[in-house]
Amino acid sequence: MIPAIIRTAFTGLRRDRGALILSFILPVAFFSIFAIVFGGQRGNRTPRISVAIVDEDHSATSQRLVEALKREGALNVLTRPEQKKGAPVPADYTSAGAENAVKQGVAPAALIIPKGFGTNPVAFGSSSSRPVFQLLHDSSDPIAPQMIAGLLQKVVMSSMGDLMADAGAKEFEAIAGGLTPQQRQTVDSRLAQIHRYAQQVDTAPSASSQGNAGGMVNVQERDVVGEKKTNPMISFEAAGIGVMFLLFTASAAGGTLLDEAESGTLDRVLSSRVSMTSLLAGKMAYCTLLAFGELSVMFLWAWAVFHLDLFEHLSGFVVMGLSTAFAVASFGMVLASVAGTRAQQAGISTLLILTMSAIGGSMFPRFLMPEMMRKIGLVTFNAWAIDGFTKVFWRDEPVMNLMPQVAVLLGSGIVLFFVARRFAKRWEYN
């Protein structure tokens, strides 16, 4: 009897496509996604971090440092804004321009090389004599400033060994109270060798570093985005989790079409004066209002409990909330019109929603993903919605700056509605 029970159970599983998908395809899909995200960091390689560089010193030494930073494989150095098609070449970043670049999300950090760096690039004495670099950063990416500060120390030590030797010799001479002529001749000879060697290796690619070389230059960090935020990451978390659950809500609401089709209610509705287009539009409008209501409750809870500054950004929230709700509602209609049964719809929706949430940033921040995965994530509603809510609550940008995200969400919703209408024709002929 036991073999017969097992055979019957597997037969039932094979017929239930939703359960079959959840049992086998979903684990493989999630494994593949996270293997790409984390498995892509092979060996000692780190993801490239964009950093805007401002050279306020304009000396040969500061330019030498900038070139050394450009050769550092872990950094993507930006010395000027991106040139737009047909526009003239933009000027190099200033401190104000670099700060705006960080605030707008162009780069997670900006490094300002101070005036006087060329005359005193490194120092072994008191910290007051060392150059002070300004590191402007966005605290929503806590890894970038630490990486850049460590790599700066490493690049200074690896690419400016001759300058370090000069500074060390001066410090030693000051401590020793002077050198004899013979000692001075020996030191100058050794320093000349070091300078010749530095010129030979100065154009070589920077090697990877194991750990922080630290201490040769002072770095002063300043958060230019989240310094006035009471709870800096709560808007990101509310948007990410909110969009994921809105997708589940839309899937469940759209699934009522399948329930009505299976019970015969849909035939009776369509036999009246209600057309399939009107029915889909009505259900999509209901789903949009339901999703927006759920999102509003979540953000109100975040305002009341976690001190999210909701009412200061109410217009941006409404625009992004309605756009997101419209997009996920159309997604629910497509799932219902494509699936043959409620079981199929449940399995397909779970697979798609969890996959979209994983690559779209609801489960894991996109700025920590490899560049390829960040680009792939842009095919999801999650990524566009999270980017839009980040602009509103984190970067304090005006509503007009939300146009790219709003256009994608509304455009996708309109296209998916027509797709759903196309597949819903099958019910009109029953």
Image (cartoon, rainbow, N blue to C red):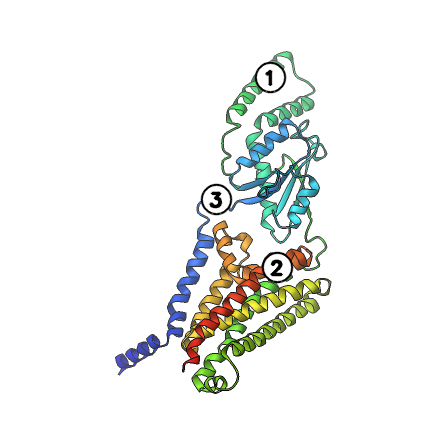
Q: CA distance from mark 1 to mark 3?
A: 39 Å
**Residue 76, picture quadrant:** top right
Q: Which residue is mark 1?
A: 188
Q: Amino acid at mark 3?
A: Arg
Q: Which mark is residue 388?
A: 2
Choose between 354 and 406: the one closer to the eye. 406
Choose between 249 and 186: the one closer to the eye. 249
Residue 362 visible in the shown view: no
Instruction: Mark 2 or mark 3: name the one nearer the start of the chain.
Output: 3
Q: Which residue is mark 3?
A: 45
Residue 215 visible in the shown view: yes
Q: Badge 3: few (under 14), some or many (20 or more) residues near its Cα, within 10 Å? A: few
Q: Decide: marks 1, 2 in contact (CB < 8 A)?
A: no
Considering only vertical position in the picture, is 39 above or below 406?
above
x%, y% of residue 282?
56, 77
Q: Amino acid at mark 2?
A: Gly
Instruction: Mark 1 or mark 3: name the one nearer the start of the chain.
Output: 3
Q: Does 344 sit left or right of 207 as displayed?
A: left
Q: Decide: marks 1, 3 in contact (CB < 8 A)?
A: no
Q: Secondary structure at mark 2?
A: helix
Task: Tell me the quadrant of the picture where the C terminus can be found.
Answer: bottom left
